[in-house]
Image (tube, grey):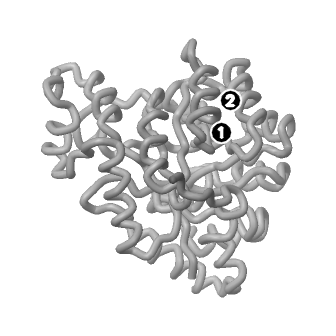
Amino acid sequence: MRINDAHCHFLSRRFFEVLSREDPRGRFNDAPADLMCAALDWDPPGTAAELANRWLATLDFQHIDRAVLIASVPGDEESVAQAVAQSPGRLTGFFMVNPLAEDASAHVERGLGPLGLKGVCLFPAMHRYHLHEPRALAVAARVASYPGAALFVHCGALTVGIRKKLGLRSRFDVRFGNPLDLQQIAVEYPSLPIIVPHFGAGLLREALMLADLCSNVYLDTSSSNHWIDYHPGLTLADVFRQALLVAGPTRLLFGTDSSFLPRGWNRAVWDAQSAALQRLGASEPDIEAIVGGNFDRLFPAVASRV
């Protein structure tokens, strides 16, 4: 079966440099990527091209055809573009934008324009803004003006494991992450694919309501989905059942939320999700759409550059 992963994080050197600025003790200032990775027992990223080639190697080892790589701090679209350039037929680039930044529009235009990336990621709980406020709407409008681009919006509970491990403070506010706040954007730009990861990350009901009301909303299945613990008695198979009932098999995107090396691609997520779909009795065509076909339809593979 063809497997595409719609959600992997590309933790470049710039990612660690930006993160190190939030450490009040300055523990990592001299060499952020190397010192942070040593503390975490992770492999340092090297250059963007080197990190991309390691990702391609782990995808090969796990028999994964294609993957989305997400630049995981604002302003890092250049790194993920360099990564995608290593194998544009297999790697698709997304990048994070903070609509509150004065240069937000410029980043959107550069990322989706000359850099050729395909998705803009919004994290309203992280940067503390409402999705219906003018600056967020302006970013959505610019994304919608690029045919083939998608808007990725993290809703619900938000935790970043690396912050916890390094003792860095998180000022995230889940009140800004209601999926229903996306309805205005979805209705205004019906041809813009809007991806809500982790089934809404604890706001499953709201994510399903949004998907039911707006046919351009997609749910990605990524992460361990520990938010299920917020709903007594709910299982991963139950989540897939409701998502299939409401959104249908053509609007679900398989993802793992894989992020760091040497672990690489997180096969445990695949094992859990494929088992849940089998337990549910999902048909083979539906499974094939979820784990590969929908990705290929939204983001057609491009030829490698000579």
Q: Is residue 57 above or below residue 209?
A: below
At label 2, which amino acid type do we have?
Answer: Leu
Q: Is residue 236 above or below residue 103?
A: below
Q: Nearer the viewer, residue 202 or 138?
A: 138
State the mark number for residue 131: 2
User: Which quadrant is home to the N terminus?
Assistant: bottom right
Q: Is residue 282 above or below residue 194?
A: below
**Is 92 displayed left or right of 113 in the figure?**
left
Q: Secondary structure at mark 2?
A: loop
Across and down, in percent, residue 291 comes to 60, 71
Which residue is located at x 55 percent, y 59 percent?
A: 89
Q: Nearer the viewer, residue 111 or 251?
A: 111
Instruction: Kindly indicate whether the residue at mark 1 contacts the one at mark 2 (C-beta within 8 angstroms).
Output: yes
Q: Earlier in the sequence, mark 2 or mark 1?
A: 2
Mark 2 residue crowding within 10 angstroms, few (<14) / some (14–19) / many (20+): many
> For the view shown, which residue lies furthest in the top direction?
102
Which residue is located at x 72 percent, y 22 percent?
A: 138
Across and down, in percent, residue 186 comes to 80, 41
* Rendered image quadrant of residue 251: bottom right
* Rendered image quadrant of residue 248: bottom right
Across and down, in percent, residue 142 comes to 73, 28
Which residue is located at x 43 percent, y 42 percent?
A: 82
Q: Secondary structure at mark 1?
A: loop
Q: Is residue 158 above or below residue 259?
A: above
The CA span between labels 2 and 1 is 9 Å
Mark 1 residue crowding within 10 angstroms, few (<14) / some (14–19) / many (20+): many
**Is 286 displayed left or right of 23 in the figure?**
right
Across and down, in percent, residue 190 comes to 85, 44
Judging by the rendered image, the residue that carries numbered circle 1 is 178
Q: From the viewer's perspective, is the residue at label 2 or at label 1 nearer?
A: 2
Q: Nearer the viewer, residue 254 or 209?
A: 254
Which residue is located at x 78 percent, y 64 percent?
A: 246
